[in-house]
Each structure stands twice: as C-alpha cells, then as structure tokens.
C-alpha cells in the first residue's frame, strides 16, 4: 500500500524567497496540500508562470515547471496541453503579469477554454518592481508611478474573466486555506479554463489592502461564501442578498423575525451568467465580498476540440527531431 501523499511531497529543496509575511507563502502551502489531498501525480503536473513575485511559484513545486516571459504563460500552457493532454497544467500569474502585458493572452486562453487552472494573485500592486500601481489598483492609490494617486479605473479580474467568456470563475483569500482549498479542488476538477482570483497581501508595498473584508474578526459581516443551490446568506445567516426586481440589482436584506423570510433570499446558481455578473461587480465596501465558486458552466475545452478536429486524432506521424532536421518548414514549388 502506497504511503499517502503530504504537502511535503510537492515541495522542492529550493529556498523560498518571498518577503517575510508575503501572502504567497500561504498560497504555496495551500496548493501543495491540495495536490496531496487529491493524490495528484507530480510526474503529470506542470506549473507555468510569467514574470512577477507570484511567478517564482514553479521553483517551489515538486512538479514540472516553466518560468516563462512576461504575460505569456498562457501561450506556453496551451502548447503543453495540446502536446500532452494528460498533463495537469496550472498557470500562475499576478494582476500585473496577467492583466497588463499579459491581458491579451489571458483573454484568449479564457475564451478558448483551455483545460488549465489559472491562479491570479491579486495584490493590487507591482510588488517585484518596487510598488508601482497595477491594473487592479483602486483610484487614489499612491505609488512611485502615481505619487498623487491613481486616476485609472481598476480592472475587476472576475468581471474581466466573465467578459472573456470564461466558464469557471472563483475567488479566494491567501490566508483562508479552509475555503481556498475546496475552490482549488473544484478548479482542478473542471474540464476547461478554471480562473481563480486569490486576494494576496503584499506586506511591503500594499499591506493589508484587503483588510476591510479579510479580517477574521469581521469576516462574517464582510464575506459571503457562494455555494450552488444555497441561499446567499452572510452575517451568520442574519443577512442575505435579495434581487430587487424593479432595479434588477442585488440588495442587502435582514433575514428572520425582523426581516424577510429566508425563502426571499436569492439562491446561488453557479450556472447563471447574469447572477455571476451581479456578484462579480458588487461595489466593494458597501456589500460583502463574494467568495467561492461564483460561476461554473462547462463547455467543450479547447484541447478536446483540437483533438476532435485534428486529422490524425493526435496520433504521432513523425518525430520532432526529424522535422527539425528537414530544414525550412516552407517548401518552394
């Protein structure tokens, strides 16, 4: 009988080099433990990253890894998956890497629905290059590149993914392994591009940016955990989200003796794209932060479609080495 896997089985002997207290440490531990829990095979697991603090991730995973060029990890992941569909491909990126220089590549890997898990670490700042504002930085963010405060409208990663026709969108918090791990498992089980935004604390350049909803003391009031088929309740069930049919918006209602019956609270349907749009665009601060699997609506993955339309059904008709030795790919008539 094989010995059960542990998180250590997915850790390398490399010294982990992030700033002390960085949220990346917690995410790394959670991913390693999750892979052990699902008995993933390190020999069939690949981590692909671009550039940024988060992109050091492949060095610390006992699996195959590619630390690629800025924003281009989706292109490498696509090639890997098409060449070997049996691989379990994970793509790690940050808000700068994935939504700025890599925004174009991220859009296409999402719309194509490539079978991969995409972990976007969102800390609303460029940490690796000394704290400039990023595509997700909120208006007014002071940074070396915006000394008087950012005036850009920030990108919502989840709304971006939905707009790109992603079929799986979820959210988690770096230090909340209890709820992040099930999200990672669900993402891995999904056949297609599974996009997970992880709120990550950059302790040096944007410390405690998400404290208004990640603080454990107030989490019950500031977080709402979405579960398919269950009412959207928070504050220990004393509050919920209700659809205002006049404005077609979500509103917070009290539930129970002094409020509406629980039957009036909206039930989460993760296959409902309109509901996902409403949840992903709720104003921060005045509403609880939706977490968990917000949208999941399977469709044919890019790699499966590729195989279906491939003339040889992926059967090898030659060797790469032989093709390279032939010289020019294009032949003159």
Image (tube, grey):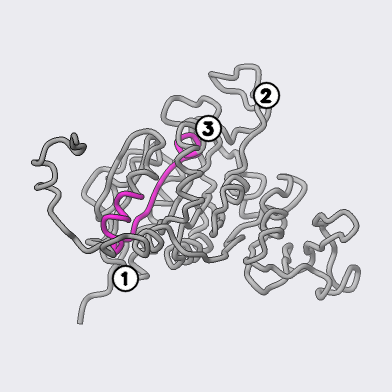
For marks 3 and 2 on the same chain, the one whose residue lies earlier in the sequence: 3
- What number of labels is visible? 3
For marks 1 and 3 on the same chain, the one whose residue lies earlier in the sequence: 1
Badge 3 crowding class, 10 Å Cα cut-off, few under 14, some 14 to 19, many 20 or more, is: many
Badge 1 crowding class, 10 Å Cα cut-off, few under 14, some 14 to 19, many 20 or more, is: few
Residues 38 and 191: in front is 191
- Toward which corner of the image does residue 93 lie, by quadrant? top left
Q: Quadrant of the C terminus?
A: top left
Task: Give the alpha-carbon distance from disc 3 to disc 2, as whole Å.
Answer: 14 Å
Q: Which residue is mark 1?
A: 39
Badge 2 crowding class, 10 Å Cα cut-off, few under 14, some 14 to 19, many 20 or more, is: few
Residue 269 screen position, x and y as percent = 67, 68
Label for residue 151?
Answer: 2
* Magenta part of the chain: 78-98
Task: Give the alpha-carbon distance from disc 1 to disc 3, as whole Å.
Answer: 34 Å
Residues 255 and 204: in front is 255
| Residue 102 in the figure: left or right of residue 58 | right
Task: Give the alpha-carbon distance from disc 2 to disc 1, as whole Å.
Answer: 46 Å
Say whether residue 83 is magenta.
yes
Q: Is residue 131 above or below residue 235?
A: above
Residue 8 screen position, x and y as percent = 28, 60
- Toward which corner of the image does residue 208 lie, by quadrant? top right
| Residue 276 in the figure: left or right of residue 116 | right
Label for residue 125?
Answer: 3
Point 65% across, 54% down: residue: 217
Residue 178 screen position, x and y as percent = 51, 63
- Toward which corner of the image does residue 242 lie, by quadrant? bottom right
Residue 14 screen position, x and y as percent = 23, 45
For marks 2 and 1 on the same chain, the one whose residue lies earlier in the sequence: 1
| Residue 271 in the figure: left or right of residue 330 | right
**Can residue 208 be seen?**
yes
């Amino acid at each position: 009988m094989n010995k059960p896997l542990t998180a250590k089985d997915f850790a390398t002997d490399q010294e982990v080099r992030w700033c002390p207290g960085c949220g990346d440490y917690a995410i790394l531990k959670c991913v390693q433990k999750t892979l052990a829990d699902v008995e993933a095979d390190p020999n069939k697991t690949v981590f692909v990253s671009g550039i940024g603090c988060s992109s050091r991730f492949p060095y610390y995973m006992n699996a195959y890894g590619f630390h690629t060029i800025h924003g281009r990890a989706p292109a490498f992941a696509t090639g890997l998956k098409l060449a070997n569909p049996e691989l379990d491909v994970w793509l790690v990126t940050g808000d700068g890497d994935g939504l700025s220089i890599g925004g174009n590549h991220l859009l296409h890997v999402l719309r194509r629905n490539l079978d991969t898990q995409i972990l976007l670490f969102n800390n609303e700042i460029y940490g690796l290059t000394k704290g400039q504002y990023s595509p997700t930085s909120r208006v007014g963010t002071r940074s070396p590149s915006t000394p008087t405060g950012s005036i850009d409208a920030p990108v919502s990663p989840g709304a971006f993914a939905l707009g790109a026709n992603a079929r799986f969108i979820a959210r988690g918090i770096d230090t909340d392994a209890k709820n992040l791990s099930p999200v990672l498992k669900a993402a891995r089980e999904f056949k297609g591009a599974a996009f997970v935004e992880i709120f990550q604390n950059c302790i040096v350049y944007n410390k405690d940016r998400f404290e208004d909803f990640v603080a454990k003391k107030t989490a019950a009031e500031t977080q709402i955990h979405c579960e398919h088929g269950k009412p959207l309740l928070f504050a220990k069930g004393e509050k919920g989200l209700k659809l205002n049919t006049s404005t077609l918006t979500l509103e917070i209602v009290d539930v129970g003796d002094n409020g509406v019956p629980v039957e009036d609270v909206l039930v989460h349907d993760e296959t409902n794209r309109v509901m996902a749009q409403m949840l992903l665009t709720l104003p921060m601060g005045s509403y609880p932060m939706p977490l968990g699997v917000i949208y999941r609506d399977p469709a044919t993955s890019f790699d499966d479609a590729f195989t279906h339309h491939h003339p040889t059904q992926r059967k090898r008709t030659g060797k790469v080495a032989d093709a390279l030795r032939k010289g020019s790919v294009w032949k003159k008539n």
